[in-house]
Image: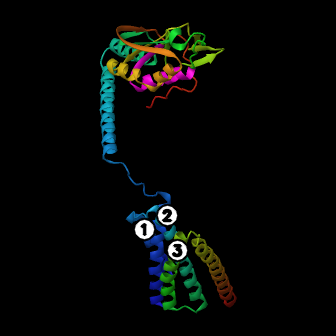
Amino acid sequence: MKERQFMFATIALILGGMLAIQFETTNNPVVRDTRDLWELRADLEKEKQRQQELNEEFERYSELLNQYKGEGKDEKIQAMEKALWDLKKQAGLTTISGQGIVITIEPFSEELIGVGQPVPKIDPDMLRRLVNELNRYDANEISIDGQRVVSKTPIREVNGNIYINNEPVSSFPIEIRVLAKDNEKLHQKIIASPAVEEFIRENFLVESKQTAKVILPAFDKDMKVKFMKPAKEET
Amino acid sequence: MWLPVLGLLLGLLLGFMSDIRVPPEYANYLSIAVLAALDTLFGGIRAHLQGSFEDKVFITGFFFNILLAAGLAYLGVHLGIDLYLAAIFAFGVRLFNNIAVIRRLIISKWSDSRKKA
């Protein structure tokens, strides 16, 4: 009788082990790492960059914290004003100037397109793609035809006209001003970018120039905030 | 009575602690093996309650059923027929039968002991 109990116990033990392994397998299956050497290197590089960015952010905030903690009311207010100014700058609510590039878009001359052909039209998708690509090449600030492009800027077509920030784009040439981290790089990249190729396919001439000083206007519309709530201060 | 339950718990604990995972392509076989093992265990309990338990049948049944089920599944994969369904079906039906018989046996035992008391 005792023997039988042990037998059952052994079988139950094996069954339990199998059940547990099966359970583990179905609930969190083995994910194989299939990255090759180059991918691993690229990922490592990315993580290192991220670490650096985080470190920089940490330093910035600890500096800010020190300023807040610093004595004197004036300093506190000054620090807050500076923080507010920085945020406004980030949101695109201030006029900004600096070394940048100017991209102009205009239709090819009639000889190139051929006489009697209709004047080419810009599709808002093309502009959006160009903006996306500019952002991808590390553009910091962008304005199109005197309209600052911020995170909420709409680029739409209404009755055959392009509207940016709900303002119609005036006639050609359209001027896009960009401030970037590395102007030279952006200039090179954007000339060869697929977005610009798209413009050329649609019979537009796109030129990019580096300029010592470009001025980008502030975003002058109301910034409507729909989905944000003030965070509660933790005590 | 408590020894098998203890064994089961110990097995579960070991399985979870060891962090062994089966590659996904073999998970099917393991699931069938688990089913076979469950079937054998319940069959053993039933035989024990009915008084027709035999050690050799139980032990060989356990391993043989597992191997047969996994082998059937393997064959099915290579023939392109879902043979593992046959194993699941057979074991599923037997599992239910066995559990039903065990339930009846336990109930009759319980009512007997109440009548005596």
Residue at which label 1 appears: B15
The residue lying toward the viewer, choosing from B111 and A139, is A139
Residue A138 sits inside the magenta stretch: yes
Q: Quadrant of the C terminus of chain A?
A: top left
Protein chain holding label 1: B
Protein chain holding label 3: B
Residue A95 as seen in the image, left or right of residue A115: left
Residue at which label 3 appears: B75
The colour scheme is rainbow
Badge 1: residue crowd in 10 Å (few <14, some 14–19, many ≥20): many
Q: What amino acid is labelled 3 in the image? A: Leu
Dominant secondary-structure state across the stretch colored magenta? helix
Asked if the residue under mark 1 is in contact with the one under mark 2, i.e. CB atoms within 8 Å, the reply is: yes
Q: At x 44% / y 80%, what residue is drawn? A: A10
Tell me the CA gap for discs 3 and 1: 28 Å
Asked if the residue under mark 3 is in contact with the one under mark 2, i.e. CB atoms within 8 Å, the reply is: no
Which dot marks residue A23?
2
Q: Position of residue A152 (x, y in %)?
A: 53, 21
Give a yes or no on whether discs 2 and 1 share a subunit: no
Give a yes or no on whether discs 3 and 1 share a subunit: yes
The image quadrant that residue B76 belongs to is bottom right
Q: Which residues are magenta?
A: A124-143
Residue A180 as seen in the image, left or right of residue B68: left
Q: Is residue A117 above or below residue A41?
A: above
